[in-house]
Structure formats: structure tokens, C-alpha cells
Image (spheres, helix red, strand yellow):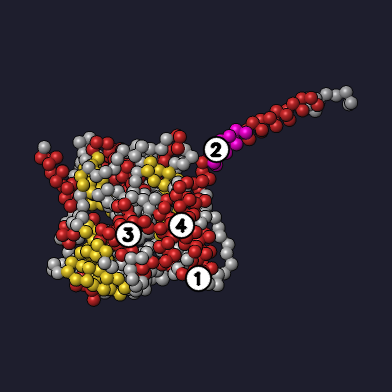
Amino acid sequence: MGNETQIGKEGPAPRGKRFWRRRGVRIASIALAALLFLLVAPLAAILYPTLKSYPRSDFPAATSQLERNRQDLAHLRRLIEVDRSFSPTAQAAFAAALEVIEQRAGDLDRAGLAIAAAKAVALADNGHTSVVGLVGGHSFNAVPIRLGWFADGLFVIATTGEQSHLLGGEILEVNGRATEAFVDALRPYFGGPANLAKEFVPNVAISPELLHAAGLAESPQESAYFIRRADGSAAQIALVATPGAPEPLNAHVWPRRDFSPLSQTGRGAGWRHVLDDVTLPAYLTRPDANVWHHYPLPDLLYIQINRIRDATPEDLSQGLVKVLDEAEKKPIRNAVVDLRFNNGGNYELTADFSRRLPAILPPEGRLFVLTSANTFSAAISTAARLKYFGGPRTVLVGEPIGDRLQFWGEGGRTVLPNSKITIRYSTAYHDWEHGCSLSEIRTCFLLNYVYDVPAGPLQPDVARSTSFADYAAGTDPAMAAVMKILMVGNAD
């Protein structure tokens, strides 16, 4: 028995062989770990600055206005730890600005702190980096009018019933400053290009407490407006403010939304709108729809995308797929994409759409993209992709977009602990004119290497702004320009 051999069963491996086997496994494991490190470490180094959260602040309960504001300023001071849009010079200026604010922290009410913070944050000169919610009627007081910019000036487009005689009036002065000088005085409180800053002026112009904090009103409760009324007469009108809704805003309110009487931004019962009795042009009929479409002509598809965000009951990308599936079954020759009220969102939701729409048009078809200063962030990305994939067939119509083609975005929001003022910070770079290069991989948003395009300039090919007379008559000069181009093209 002791000399029998067991078939199929090996004895223990020699000690030397076991040693080298274990050593081989160890070397392979080390090599794999090294390879993963070489891949993951650079990726982490690239992603971390983009995904980094705002540092948390843990303060004890404040017992005075001075202490509350100092805590808020201490939290705000950490902005430059996460926001990447500040140049070194701007970082130094931001720190110096906060030191100045600190010296008068005990005297600042909430409006004063918000305005001071806005001026400091705007030193980044980046449209996405901003104080959110500087809006009369939302946690700041407001007089009983709402304003809108047109090609020929700033006009009253909505009022309470008691002030309805001011509807259609042109604002010539605010608290003794001519409109142009008033806009210049507010410019330091908004980063980004001048047309973006101007876009937000109506939000502040209706709030005496914000204007008082900025040194542009004598009283935080009342403002005076020199108005040329619709009948041609002009008068100085003093308006008293009422408190705004108490809830602070955590997102921007774009004043252009008030162009439609169907928008309820800052309005309640008893308000009147200059277009209440006017047949609305198509672009003002669905302000609360993320996307909708119709066919002004049998061969013309019109799509208005107001926000690049998902909403119930249907995701935006799914809705756009359905629109294009439907359009492919029709004799579509030309298309219009209206982005004039679109302040952005997630550009991935329109990525497939912006590539597919030009592809379903015939070679001789036209793709019109309508833009304004309200066209911002992901809406700019969408316009750039439409232009790129549409090629020479793409015609931009309207006003310049609301930001530069090189900007910092992504990031997130933080809330000052006591005042509840929201700050928007930015962490990733975009270039929708040239596209991101590999040399910019540490700063460019990583998804841009999948989605961005070198679209070139996005200045309108056909410049069209709406005058107040056009608006009050219910006409749409941008769409009128599109129709004229199509008629000339069809005639040829």
C-alpha cells in the first residue's frame, strides 16, 4: 500500500516553484496597481477641481448683525478656493474687496450685504460666477412695475392695476440718472459681457432697497422714475415699494420672461400687462414649456427650447426625439430653433438633437437659430453645435448671445449661512468658438472633449432687435426676417 501511486493527484510543488509563482502574482498585482494609478491619478487630478464641493462652514449661532455678516463674509471668502474663473489679479482684488466690506459689516442690512457681495464676486468677470437672486419682488422689495429692454429703450411692460396708466411708458431716468448712466452705474455688480449685465438691470431697477444699497437711491423704500408715457407726456413718478416674497432665490430670474403676459414672474392678482389685449406672436405663447413646436409653413419646422432641463412628464431629449421623428415624416425643408429665452441647463440633453436636426434637412434647406442676450450657458453650447453641424446652411438671427464663447461654467451654488444669499461658482472652462485643445485638459470641462465643436463666432448673421412698437403690436421682427429670407429663397 505504501508503494502505490495515486493517478491524477499531484504532490506538493517544489518549494522553489511555489516561491516564483507567488512572486509572479505579486509582480503582476504591483504592475496592475501601477497601471491603474497611472490612469486614475491623472484623471482624478483633472476631475477633482471640477467636482470639488464648496468648503463647509461651521459657525456658532450669531447674536448680532455684525457677527452674522462676518460669518457670511468668512464663508464667502472661501469662494476662490473652488471657483476657477478668478485670475490671480482678480483673486487679490476679491480678497481686498472683502476686507473693505468687513470694516462696515455691522452697518450692512441684507440688501447691503448682497450688493457688496455681488460687486466683489463680479470681479471674476465671468457670467456664471455671480450672486443669485438680486431681484425686486423676491426677498427684496419692489415697486409696482415691471420693466423690459427693447431696441429703443427700457419700457414698463407690467404694473398693478393702480399704476396701469404707466403701461407702455419709457423709463428716461431712475432716481435722477439717465437710463444709460444708470446702466453704467450697475455694471460693476455683474460679471461677464456688458449685454449680459444690462439684461439683469430690470431686476434691480424695481427695488429701492437694492438701489439704496448700491448708492443709487436716497430711500430704501421709494424710487423716482422719469417716464415718457404712452400718450407722449412725461412726468416724474415716485413709487413706493412693497416687501418681496420672503423666500430667497437660489436661481437667476431672467427679466425677459416677463415679456409674455402668460409668465407670472413677480406678478399676482390685479396685475396688468401691456400685451393683455394683444394677439401674441408664437414665441410668447408658451413661456413655461421647456420645448414646443409647430409648423408656420408646411415645409418649416419651428422649435422653441426655453430651458435645457428635464421636466415631467417627458424628458427633454425624449421630447426632441419625438419632434424630429415627426418632422422626418413631413416635407420639411427648413427649420427654426428659437433660443431667445433659453438660459441654459445641461447641454447633453440637446447634443443628439443639435446633430440630427441639420441631418434631416435637405442640402438646400436652411437652419435658422434665433438668439438674444438671454441665450446663455447650455443654450450657447446648443447654438454652437447647431451652427457647426448645419454648416453654411445655418443662419443666426436676432441679438448677440448673453456670454462670451470662452467662459467658465459647471460648479454649483453655496448659500451664505445667515443671510441665505446664494452664490454661484464655476469650476470648468468652455470654448465654443475653437473647441477645447489637449493643452487645456486640466481646465476644460471633460465632456467637452466629446461634445464641443469649433463653431467659430456666433454673432447674428441677420441682426434683429425688437422695438417697443413692434412688441406692443404683437409682431416678431426676428421671425419676420426668417420669413423674408425664405420667400426670397423660394422665389429664386
Q: Is residue 216 left or right of residue 469?
A: right
Q: Secondary structure at mark 3?
A: helix
Q: Amino acid at mark 1?
A: Gln
Q: Which corner quadrant holds the C terminus? A: top left
- Most foreground residue, 285 or 401: 401
Circles 2 and 1 in contact, beta carbons < 8 Å: no
Q: Are marks 4 and 3 in contact (CB under 8 Å)?
A: no
Alpha-carbon span between mark 1 and mark 4? 19 Å
Of label 2 and label 1, which has the lower sequence position?
A: 2
Q: Would you say residue 16 sits in the magenta stretch?
A: no
The dot on residue 42 is: 2
The nearer-to-camera label among 4 and 2 is: 4
User: Which label belongs to residue 445?
Assistant: none
Q: Residue at x 31, y 65 (%)?
A: 205
Q: Residues within 10 Å of mark 2 (few under 14, many from 20)?
A: few
Residue type, numbered disc 4: Ala
